[in-house]
Each structure stands twice: as C-alpha cells, then as structure tokens.
Image (spheres, grey):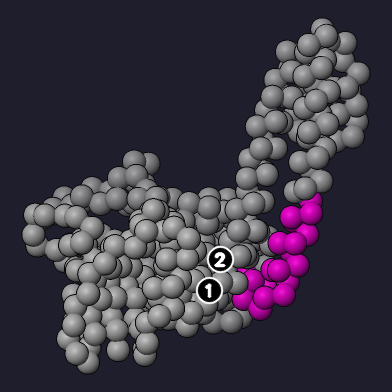
Amino acid sequence: MKIVGCDLHAGQQSIAMMDSETGELTEKVLKHEGNAVREFYGWLEGPVVVGIEATGAMQWFLELLEELGIECRVGHPAKIRAAETRQQKHDRRDAEVILELLLMKNRFPDIWMPSTEQRDLRSLLRDRHQWVKMRARLQHTLQAIALNHALRKGKALWTATGRQALQDLALPDYTAQRRDELLRLYLQLERRIQQLDKQVEKEAQGRPQARRLLTHPGVGPVTALATEVFLGDPHRFRTAKEVASYIGMIPCEHSSGKRRRLGKLTKEGNSRLRYLWTEASPTEDSRYGVVIGPNHTQNEGTLPGTVCIPAVLHGVCRRATDAAFGAHVDRPRCRLC
C-alpha cells in the first residue's frame, strides 16, 4: 500500500510517499503541466491513499483521483499546521507532516467532503446567487434614476406598470440611453433567474430531505436545497448547537472566571447558507413568539431566531418528519430563548 502526503498548490504539488511494504520513502515535486499529474498517479500500483489539506483549487485534483479510483483524504489546514512543532515551513516539510499524520492511527484531521452531485448542485445555487446580486445592483441604479426624476414607486417599480412609467420618463439623452440599456438588461436577468428558480425547485422537490424542509414556514426551495447540499448528512452533528457553530451563527466568546463576554457572530462556515438561514429566522421568531430573555443583551452576537432556525431545521432533517403546522416537530430549546 502506498501512502502519499501531498502539499497541493495551483501550479505544482510536493509529494512525500511511503510504501508500507518496503518502507521506501519517495519525495517529488510535480508540475501541473500537461498530463504529468495523471501519469504519475496512474502508474501507482496497489491500494493508494492520498492526503491533502483543504484548499480552494483542489476540485480538479479530487475529480482526477476519483476517476483513477484512488482514495483521497482531505484534512483541516489549521489542525494539520498545529501538528507541526518545528519553526521551519516549506512545501517539502508540509508534505512530510501530512504523510506522518496519515501513518499514525486516527491522527489525520479528516473533514467532510461533498459528493460530486452535491458540488454540482452547489454550483447551481452559486450561479443563481450571482445573477440575483447583479439584478439587485441594477435595480438600485434604476431606482436612483427614478427617484432623481420624482418617480416614487418603491417595489412597484418592478411591475409592468412601474417599468412602463420609468420608460415614459422624459430624460436627457445619455440618461435615457442608460435607462433603456439597464431596463433591457433587467429583463434578461429576470428571465435567467426565473429559469434557475425552476431548476432549483425541481431539484428540491426531487430530494426527500429538501421536501421535508419545505414544510417548515419561511423555508423555500433555495433554502431547502442549500441546507441539504451545504450541510450534508445531518447525523454527523450530534446537537443543533454544533450545526449553528458549523455555520458560524454563534457569538465569539472571551470569558474568564465569573466574567462572561460574548461578541459578534463568528461568521465561520458557509456564508451563503448563513445568509439564507438568517432570512428564515424572522418567520421562525414570529411562529413561536420568541422574546429576548433577561440574560440576552443587545451587544451579544446572536439573536434567538439565529439559534432556533438551525435547531428546527436540524431536527426536521434528523427525525425525518414534517414541520407543517408544528404538528410533528417539538420546538428545540436553545440557551438564549
């Protein structure tokens, strides 16, 4: 069996490989040029385990190893670095540290990795999010043009009547040209977003866990699908507090002795899922009549709803029950409400 510690970069990778049968150690630097990486891993015989630390440019490498039938273990970068006691840091040493952790039983800090299907669905959600952001920027610009010329429609500006009123405004030449181009672009963005919404809804309706999440008030197809593909298997979290911590919806804490100090939200984890859950929190608060308790002050970094929504959605996923009308799901309790 060959065990490979790999320090992966965008242009190259440093490798420290150990043959468990012969004890032979091989160190090598592979340039990401041509088929050099595919040829190297394709020539390896017998069972092969490759360990890398999580990085942003690793998806192509994971797909390559999956295609070649090679097991790849992805580790937490901070925990891998913490295992190194030396003051020297370079690529060759980083690969050796990964190899050492792989050789020691239960020492490699594995992290959960999404499947190929989940990664593809994440791309769908990211694509939709980018188009929505572009539409929002365009709407702000058109709204500013309307307000500067005494057209106050608010949200009604995006109806057919509102757009016609904006189109009928008498504007100077260049301002009129700008308005016309922005309106034309707005319609294109709207059509594309509607197409993506249909795809998201189709995927959400076709997945049992997402359908269960849709039964909860305030959760739509985007939030339901994002919860499933970004959170993964809910059973890997023992409690709802672990879910909230994973998404970054808990406050920073700096406490000592009897003094307890809570700060702003940690904002660790996936920012898109945290945003969607925060949007769903007002519905959760109004449903259960949440009020801020005496131990919850305004300078603490979390609101009751931001803790309750992970608790409820985590419970819906784990117990495989519907949340319609609150008949099948008991409200999880959190420490703030």
Q: Give 37 or 163, whichever is nearer the viewer.
A: 37
Was residue 39 drawn as part of the magenta stretch in this picture?
Answer: no
Three-letter code, disc 1: Ser
- Residue at (22% x, 92% y) in the render: 21
Q: Are marks 2 and 1 in contact (CB under 8 Å)?
A: yes
Residue 264 in which image quadrant: top left
Q: Residue 171: image x %, image y %?
A: 83, 10
Q: Residue 130: image x %, image y %?
A: 63, 45
Q: Residue 213: image x %, image y %?
A: 63, 70
- Residue at (74% x, 56% y) in the render: 197
The magenta segment: 194-213
Was residue 204 drawn as part of the magenta stretch in this picture?
Answer: yes
Q: Is residue 27 above or below residue 103?
A: above
Q: Is residue 204 left or right of residue 56?
A: right
Instruction: Give the residue pinned by disc 2.
Output: 119
The image's mark for residue 331 is: none
Local packing at callout 1 (Cα closer than 10 Å; few below 14, some 14-19, many 20+) is few
